Image: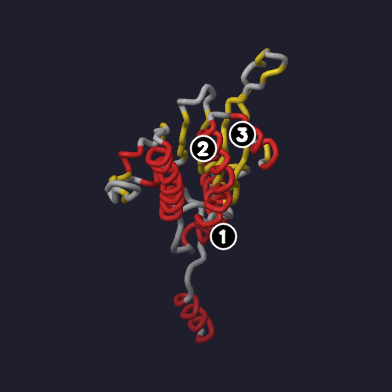
Amino acid sequence: MRRKKDQSAEMAGAPATGGRGRRARTGTAAIDSDGAPPQAKRPGRPSKTTGVRTLDDELARIASEETSALPGELGPREHAHIARELLDVFFNIWIRFAVDLGRELRMSPWQWDFVIYEGGKDYRFRESFNFTRIREVLLEEAAFPYRHMLKGELCRVAGKNFVRVSFVLEEGRQFDRTEVATAVNSYTIYNVPADKFGARQLKDAISEPLRAWIRSEVRGDPAILWDFCHEKLRRGR
């Protein structure tokens, strides 16, 4: 009897199993409302729209990083510096033609937008002028029978910035008293990557072409400038 009583006590202290199915339903504390444990649920697949957006973001990031790393890229300060130097050289030519030769070249941008003239050959820049907007500077001789133009530009070639100065000339030749049709040719005076630009080097490069231009003006013979460009300069685009 004692042994049977002890067995009954042990059974009273043991939890009731109630079968395998009941234990599976009540034996876990974290069960989702649909009856599946969290670890049993499969994560959903991203939509096609999400995938395209992710790819676009990644491509934009890569393009931005690669573009910003390109050599010769110009920041606003570098751009303004180069534009200011180009304008200084070109306006210096303009004022010397006007004062020394009595010939007024046509300039773009208009010289009085960025310069304050102080008489003689003295001038200063307007500090309020936005130099970062300048990508091209032109000096044009309109009095010649042929249009002669000095052109300075900040241009982009193969993803890299260059500073280029060139003559763009209308040329006409006469053979047996018959004038051939006028041709427009470009001749490169100075062409360097923007990060290699130097005002002194530009002035050195332009001095001889400028001398030929002035000589042709004084003597009234445009062929002097044409011949110099044919012999000394490289044909541009």
Front position in the image: 191 or 123: 123
Sequence order check, earlier mark of 3 and 1: 1
Q: Is residue 224 left or right of residue 17?
A: right
Q: Nearer the viewer, mark 3 or mark 1?
A: 3
Label 1 residue SS: helix
Tag 3 or tag 2, which sits nearer the N-term?
A: 2
* Quarter location, residue 170: top right
**Alpha carbon separation for disc pair 2 and 3:** 19 Å
Q: Residue at x 48, y 82 (%)?
A: 5
Query: Seen from this angle, which residue lies furthest bottom?
Result: 2
In the foreground, 131 or 202: 202
Q: Residue at x 58, y 46 (%)?
A: 208
Q: Secondary structure at mark 2?
A: strand
Residue 150, numbered circle: none
Residue 10 showing in the rendered view? yes
Q: CA distance from mark 1 to mark 2?
A: 93 Å
Asked if disc 2 and disc 3 are in contact, CB closer than 8 Å, the reply is no
Q: Which residue corresponds to the image point at 50% horizontal and 55% vertical from the top-left? A: 199
Q: Which residue is mark 2?
A: 151
Residue 154 vertical position relative to residue 197 in the rendered view, above or below: above
Q: Residue furthest right?
A: 176
To which residue does mark 3 refer? 224
x 44%, y 63%: residue:
29
Check disc 3 and give the amino acid type: Ile
- Mark closest to the chain's N terminus, 1 or 2: 1
Q: Please state which amino acid type lies under the numbered disc 1.
A: Arg
**Camera-side residue: 54 or 116?**
116
Q: Position of residue 90 (x, y in %)?
A: 45, 43
What label sits on residue 20 in the rendered view? 1
The amino acid type found where label 2 is placed reads: Lys
